[in-house]
């Protein structure tokens, strides 16, 4: 449950940050779709039948969604820690975009 809440707030703050970063709604869709595909569909990379030792697989396994899948399989608390780091990163991104928007006024 903790992991799902962290993942929810990760995507929420990521969307808020992108919304504050861009100027129009159309631009927000253009900026947010690749980011959401990158973070939301990382488990689908395993279906590309790549070799297990690939660097791309090692990198994408550190993303939040595969970490929660790994946590569900193994019960490891390390995965929650990694998702928490991603959550803190999204909060910082939203905060930086908020401060940038505030200074533009």
Image (tube, rainbow, N blue to C red):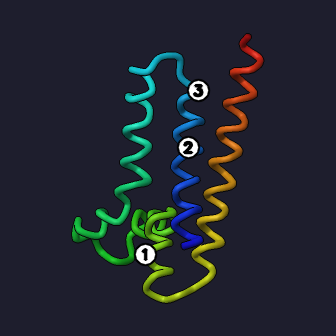
- What residue is disc 2 on? 14
- What residue is disc 1 on? 69
Secondary structure under the numbered disc 3 in the rendered image = helix
Relative image position of residue 77 (x, y in whole percent): 62, 82
In the image, 38 versus 101, the foreground residue is 101
Query: Which dot marks residue 48?
Result: none
Which residue does the image show at 54% across and 33% down from the upper left?
18
Which residue does the image show at 53% across and 17% down from the upper left?
23
Picture quarter with the N terminus? bottom right
Relative image position of residue 87 (x, y in whole percent): 63, 56
Secondary structure under the numbered disc 1 in the rendered image = helix
Q: CA distance from mark 2 to mark 3?
A: 10 Å
Crowd rating for badge 1 (residues with CA inside 10 Å; few <14, some 14–19, many 20+): some
Number of numbered tags placed on the structure image: 3
Left or right of 7, for residue 84: right
Picture quarter with the C terminus? top right
Q: Are marks 1 and 2 in contact (CB under 8 Å)?
A: no
Q: Is 64 located above or below residue 28 in the figure?
A: below
Looking at marks 3 and 1 on the same chain, the residue that comes earlier in the sequence is marked by 3
Q: CA distance from mark 1 to mark 2?
A: 20 Å
Q: CA distance from mark 3 to mark 1?
A: 30 Å
- What residue is disc 3 on? 21
Looking at marks 1 and 2 on the same chain, the residue that comes earlier in the sequence is marked by 2
Relative image position of residue 34 (x, y in whole percent): 38, 40
Looking at marks 2 and 3 on the same chain, the residue that comes earlier in the sequence is marked by 2
Q: Is 98 located above or below residue 88 in the figure?
A: above
């Amino acid at each position: 449950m903790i992991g799902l809440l962290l993942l929810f707030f990760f995507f929420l703050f990521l969307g808020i940050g992108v919304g504050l970063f861009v100027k129009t709604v159309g631009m927000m869709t253009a900026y947010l779709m690749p980011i959401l595909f990158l973070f939301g569909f990382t488990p689908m990379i395993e279906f590309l039948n790549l070799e297990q030792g690939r660097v791309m697989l090692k990198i994408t396994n550190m993303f939040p969604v595969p970490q929660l899948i790994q946590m569900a399989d193994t019960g490891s608390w390390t995965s929650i820690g990694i998702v928490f780091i991603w959550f803190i990163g999204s909060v910082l991104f939203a905060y930086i975009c908020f401060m940038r928007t505030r200074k533009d006024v």
